[in-house]
Image (tube, helix red, strand yellow):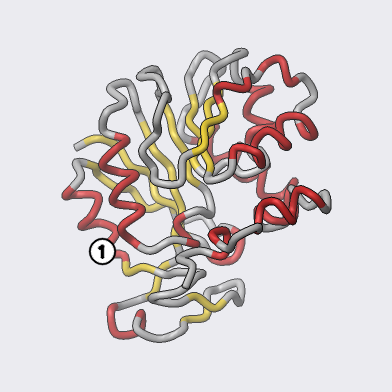
Amino acid sequence: MAVSPYDVPGFYDRALETGKHRDIVGGRWDETGRMQMQILHDIGVAPDHHLLDIGAGSLRLGCKAVEHLNPGHYWATDASRALMLRGRDAELSDPSRLPPDHLIEDARFDFPDVPNVITHAICFAVFTHLPLPYLRRALTNLQRFDSLQCFAFTVFLAPDAQTALHPYRQPDGVVTHDIRAPYHMVAGDVEHVAQQTGWTLTHDPRRLPRGQVLYQATRV
């Protein structure tokens, strides 16, 4: 069984062939992109900073962030480089601001070839489709970026460990699960993983699409 629906063979190829590069990243393209940009503003991302967009998809955030940042200051990873390249070609008003080699295929949160200039990172609506060990991998591997000031990420939460064993309806109605996508986690587990990997978490109280919960991670 695939860990994530994105792991199904041919998933990306079919979407790209049918022109659905926007649809497969979760819909609400403009609304969600604007919210992601607001998060970046709130964590202090300025044009001269260097952003890593983890799980960037077809650049729903990237098409806005690239315009905000100085040219060449946006980096992105995703399980499908082809999807990111389609976003670069179709969604950026000036693709020359984003070098193609800044779009890196990475399904393991290893961040290969991402330089040690990253000051901020965001991972929006990605861990909602993956189990907890992937969050641990990301938090562990992000420690190598010496200049990283803040990492913002979202998850679905269940209220406690017993409830988490069963399907749980989120505030916006989506039903999440313990061992299949979309996944929920327990806040204590998220906080424990962060502590073990060297991060302090701040829970952001804002309401996000589909009931996602936003965390901001800073170094201990």
Residue under the point 64% across and 22% down: 68
Up/down of 212 relative to 220, above or below: below
x%, y% of residue 102?
Answer: 55, 23
Up/down of 52 relative to 100, above or below: below
x%, y% of residue 163?
Answer: 35, 84
- Please identify the quarter of the rendering in which residue 70 is found: top right
**Type of the residue with mark 1:** Asp
**In the displayed image of the protein, which residue is found farthest to the right?**
18
Up/down of 86 relative to 10, above or below: above
Residue under the point 56% across and 17% down: 47
x%, y% of residue 31?
Answer: 72, 49
- Please identify the quarter of the rendering in which residue 127 is found: bottom left
Q: Mark 1 points at which residue?
A: 189
Report the side of 57 relative to 117 (left or right): right
Residue under the point 51% across and 13% down: 48
Residue at disc 1, secondary structure: helix
Q: How crowded is mark 1: few (under 14 residues within 10 Å), some or many (20 or more)?
A: few
Up/down of 90 relative to 192, above or below: above
Image quarter in which the C terminus is found:
top left
